[in-house]
Image (cartoon, grey):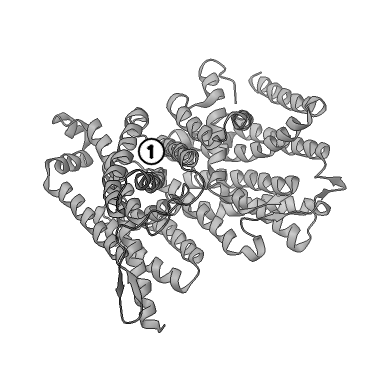
């Protein structure tokens, strides 16, 4: 019964998103497509941070791996969109494996700084090889290269539906992961690493696996973002993009399946509406971070779960 | 120019970088050593110092030296005040829990940068140097002010060392660092020590910024590089070890000067960040530190 209730809730959310495809005004239609792609990234971040307790400050490296893995293939090798998306997904996972092998030797504060440093080195590398990546200016992916099995990714309607399909896959996979045995082991690792080790689980393997899954999500999101919105630039691999998923996850609720999406949705519109009043949108981000960590460290869904909705995965 | 003088120039430039870096990084190191707080907003405090120095130079009439002296006093006080406020209002309530404080200081960083952008604007603005003379070496002339920066930074660092080693306040800080609970049992107001240390760390960054701003203009995003470099220095020197921080600042500053003169600065930064990450992975206590991170 427990699993069913959760499944119904998540399918319901997906149904609402499908309904929005037909009803939402053009402006929000585009926004929601973007939010769904970013939510995949945030879900990936949540698998590392929310479930496994790995606070990374360098996920932009994984997002960037997907973004450039896909973007450079399309731009320099004329790869087709499906190949590029799969390449981006794998690039994210491979980058997570490489970072994890080194960074997971540390924990706590050192882990945060090491991931931050790796991401910074990655960002600078993108700038350094500006002749291939076009650095800050970025690559604009031509429309002809944004075709997915005959579907035009630059078309608003197709883009929304593809984004929804990717988001739905990612969300349901995340739900399955959270309810699986491995999902519970990840949480055990977060709650008490020593005790889990005593029970026979290898913390390093569990964390590395979680990080790789997180990298696959981030890479997929990066690749999809580049191809759908036609732009691959260094700013998308900067520190800012390491902080964004952290913010989304904190707002929506760390360690909840729907939290990353809810956080991305609310934060996106909060900044959007704030921009109408003031151009100080960095202030909104900063204040949101400080207020959340002070008053609601569990986020919205985390708080709801603590207040009675115990079945929320 | 021949290789020899060119290298000398690179080393002198590196020395200026090292001096400013040592000041900034010792602020970060102080907060980490005593409070165990990794302050991501440290670069923003640095930037704030430079931006405030520009405002002071606009408001204080008279010769550049006078407004510079005023900035050297006013900026660290204001920045320190803001830091103390942030500590009392935010960090203390988080109980200095490492992950929470990092998130909170990231938020603080955004807020401060936005404040600078809103009140100071997106342009880089110059601040006049307090003195204007050149030292003529056989091969090239060199700005006398830059040498003054090195001397000034050394004096401030000496003062910090004297305060920590030879005053009651320094004793209290060191006691708090070694054992917070015992210090509290001896009647030390740990909350006040923490606020003071956090303010002092931020103030050091502000002094460094005031010193460097006549050479490098004030800009609302100028805090990124000092933050990154300070992290590098503090980690290589051993988290929380002030002596290690100084040695590492000298090492990084000089090699940064040499590498960026002869190679691309971006490459220098890539190498430095990777080295740091690897140092943290394989030698978490730093190259000179003895304590575990």
Residue under the point 17% across and 33% down:
B182
In percent of width and height, residue B136 lies at: 30, 76
Label 1 sits on a secondary structure element that is helix
Residues A35 and B4: in front is B4
Chain holding disc 1: B
* Residue placed furthest toward the front: B62
Left/right placement of residue A57 relative to residue A129 reads left
Locate residue A275, reporting x and y percent.
Answer: 60, 32
Residue farthest to the right, as pictured: A150
User: Can residue B240 be spotted in the picture?
Assistant: no
| Residue in the picture at 12% in, 44% down | B167
Q: Nearer the viewer, residue A59 or B146?
A: B146
Q: Position of residue B60 (x, y in %)?
A: 32, 45
Can see residue A227?
A: yes
Q: Residue furthest bottom?
A: B2
Q: Quadrant of the N terminus of chain B?
A: bottom left
Direction from residue A282 to residue B31 in the image, left or right: left
> Residue B184, relative to residue B55: is it above or below?
above
B207 and B93: which one is in front?
B207
């Amino acid at each position: 019964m427990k699993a069913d209730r959760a499944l119904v809730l998540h399918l319901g959310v997906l149904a609402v998103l499908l309904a929005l495809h037909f009803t939402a005004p053009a402006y929000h239609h585009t926004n929601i497509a973007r939010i769904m792609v970013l939510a995949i990234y945030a879900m990936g971040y949540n698998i590392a941070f929310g479930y496994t307790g790995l606070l990374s400050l360098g996920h932009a490296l994984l997002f960037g791996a997907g973004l450039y893995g896909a973007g450079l293939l399309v731009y320099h090798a004329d790869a087709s969109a499906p190949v590029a998306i799969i390449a981006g997904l794998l690039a994210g996972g491979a980058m997570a494996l490489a970072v994890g092998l080194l960074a997971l030797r540390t924990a706590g504060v050192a882990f945060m700084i090491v991931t931050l440093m790796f991401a910074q080195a990655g960002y600078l590398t993108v700038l350094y090889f500006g002749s291939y990546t076009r650095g800050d200016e970025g690559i604009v992916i031509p429309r002809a290269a944004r075709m997915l099995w005959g579907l035009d990714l630059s078309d608003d309607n197709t883009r929304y539906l593809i984004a929804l399909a990717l988001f739905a896959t990612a969300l349901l996979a995340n739900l399955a992961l959270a309810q699986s045995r491995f999902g519970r082991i990840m949480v055990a690792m977060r709650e008490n690493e020593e005790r889990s080790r005593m029970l026979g689980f290898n913390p390093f393997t569990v964390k590395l696996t979680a990080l790789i899954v997180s990298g696959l999500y981030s890479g997929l999101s990066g690749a999809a973002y580049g191809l759908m919105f036609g732009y691959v630039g260094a700013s998308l691999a900067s520190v800012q993009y390491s902080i964004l998923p952290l913010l989304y996850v904190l707002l929506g609720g760390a360690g909840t399946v729907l939290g990353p999406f809810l956080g991305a949705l609310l934060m996106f519109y909060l900044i959007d509406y704030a921009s109408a009043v003031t151009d100080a949108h960095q202030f909104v981000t900063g204040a949101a971070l400080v207020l959340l960590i002070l008053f609601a460290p569990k986020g919205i869904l985390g708080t709801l779960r603590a207040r009675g909705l115990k079945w929320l995965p | 120019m021949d290789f020899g003088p060119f290298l000398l120039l690179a080393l002198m430039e590196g020395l200026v970088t090292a001096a400013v870096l040592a000041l900034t990084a010792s602020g970060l190191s102080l907060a980490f050593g005593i409070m165990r707080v990794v302050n991501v907003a440290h670069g923003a405090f640095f930037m704030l110092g430079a931006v405030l120095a520009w405002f002071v130079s606009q408001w204080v009439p008279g010769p550049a030296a006078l407004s510079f002296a005023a900035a050297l006093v006013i900026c660290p006080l204001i920045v320190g005040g803001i830091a103390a406020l942030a500590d009392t209002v935010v960090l203390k309530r988080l109980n200095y829990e490492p992950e929470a404080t990092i998130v909170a200081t990231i938020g603080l960083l955004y807020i401060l940068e936005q404040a600078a952008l809103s009140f100071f604007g997106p342009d880089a603005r110059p601040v006049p140097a307090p003195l204007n003379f050149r030292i003529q070496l056989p091969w090239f002339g060199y700005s006398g002010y830059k040498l003054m920066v090195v001397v000034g930074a050394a004096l401030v660092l000496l003062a910090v060392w004297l305060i920590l080693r030879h005053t009651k306040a320094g004793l209290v800080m060191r006691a708090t660092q070694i054992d917070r609970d015992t210090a509290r049992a001896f009647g030390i107001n740990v909350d006040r020590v923490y606020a003071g240390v956090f303010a002092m760390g931020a103030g050091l960054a502000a002094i460094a910024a005031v010193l460097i701003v006549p050479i490098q203009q004030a800009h609302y995003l100028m805090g990124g590089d000092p933050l990154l470099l300070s992290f590098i220095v503090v980690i290589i020197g051993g988290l929380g070890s002030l002596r290690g921080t100084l040695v590492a600042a000298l090492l990084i500053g000089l090699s940064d000067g040499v590498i960026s003169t002869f190679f691309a600065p971006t490459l220098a930064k890539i190498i430095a960040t990777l080295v740091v990450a690897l140092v943290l992975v394989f030698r978490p206590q730093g190259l000179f530190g003895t304590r575990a991170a």
